[in-house]
């Protein structure tokens, strides 16, 4: 059971705990790990990352050798007014993820797409690693 603070000795304060929330709580690190799916298909690998609230302009992807690094930063604010009161909420977040790719991927043709809060990075396999499916005609009389 939570005890509420008393204001002026007899009224519960609607601000109970607010001072602790704002002043006594340590600032938490807004850097976080994002959820990742890695899919291997016959012709490529796909790295999917859940990054809602990010703008594609603030997502940076770099390939250094066989190390794929993806980082992003979000700065959002929303505001609404009610009579003489203005309320603002700011939210900042960032992420960095790195992946070691197989050494023989086709790094020149990596593509990225961002839709509905999901970043998809497609890393093609080299021609020699792609699964070849060929129909063979049966000859006979």
Image: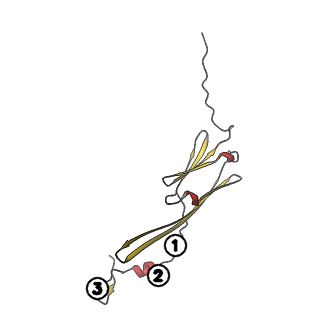
Q: Residues within 10 Å of mark 2 (few under 14, many from 20)?
A: few
Q: Quadrant of the C terminus?
A: top right
Q: Residue 42: give x, y in percent of width and height.
A: 60, 38
Q: Is residue 40 left or right of residue 126?
A: left
Mark 2 or mark 1, which has the lower sequence index? 2
Relative height, residue 101 to residue 24 (above, below): above
Q: Secondary structure at mark 3?
A: strand
Figure quadrant of residue 6: bottom left
Q: Which residue is mark 2?
A: 23
Q: Secondary structure at mark 1?
A: loop
Q: Residue 110: give x, y in percent of width and height.
A: 64, 47
Q: Which residue is mark 3?
A: 11
Contact between labelled residues 3 and 2, with CB atoms less than 8 Å apart: no
Q: Is residue 22 left or right of residue 45?
A: left
The residue drawn where x is 56% and y is 57% is 56
| Extreme residue in the bottom direction | 8
Q: Residue 32: give x, y in percent of width and height.
A: 54, 64
The residue drawn where x is 63% and y is 35% is 131
| Extreme residue in the top direction | 141
Q: Secondary structure at mark 2?
A: helix
Figure quadrant of residue 36: bottom right
Q: How far is disc 2 from disc 1 in space, using C-alphas?
A: 13 Å
Q: How far is disc 1 from disc 3 in space, using C-alphas?
A: 32 Å
Q: Which mark is residue 28?
A: 1
Relative height, residue 123 to residue 90 (above, below): above
């Amino acid at each position: 059971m939570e005890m509420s603070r008393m204001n002026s000795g007899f009224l519960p304060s609607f601000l109970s705990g607010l001072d602790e929330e704002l002043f006594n709580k340590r600032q938490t690190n807004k850097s976080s790990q994002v959820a990742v799916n890695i899919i291997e298909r016959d012709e490529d690998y796909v790295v999917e990352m859940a990054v809602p609230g990010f703008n594609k302009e603030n997502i940076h992807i770099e390939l250094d050798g066989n190390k794929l690094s993806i980082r992003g930063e979000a700065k959002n604010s929303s505001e609404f007014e009610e009579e003489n009161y203005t309320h603002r909420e700011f939210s900042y977040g960032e992420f960095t993820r790195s992946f070691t790719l197989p050494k023989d991927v086709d790094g020149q043709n990596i593509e990225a797409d961002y839709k509905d809060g999901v970043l998809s990075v497609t890393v093609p396999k080299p021609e020699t690693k792609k699964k070849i499916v060929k129909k063979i005609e049966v000859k006979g009389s």
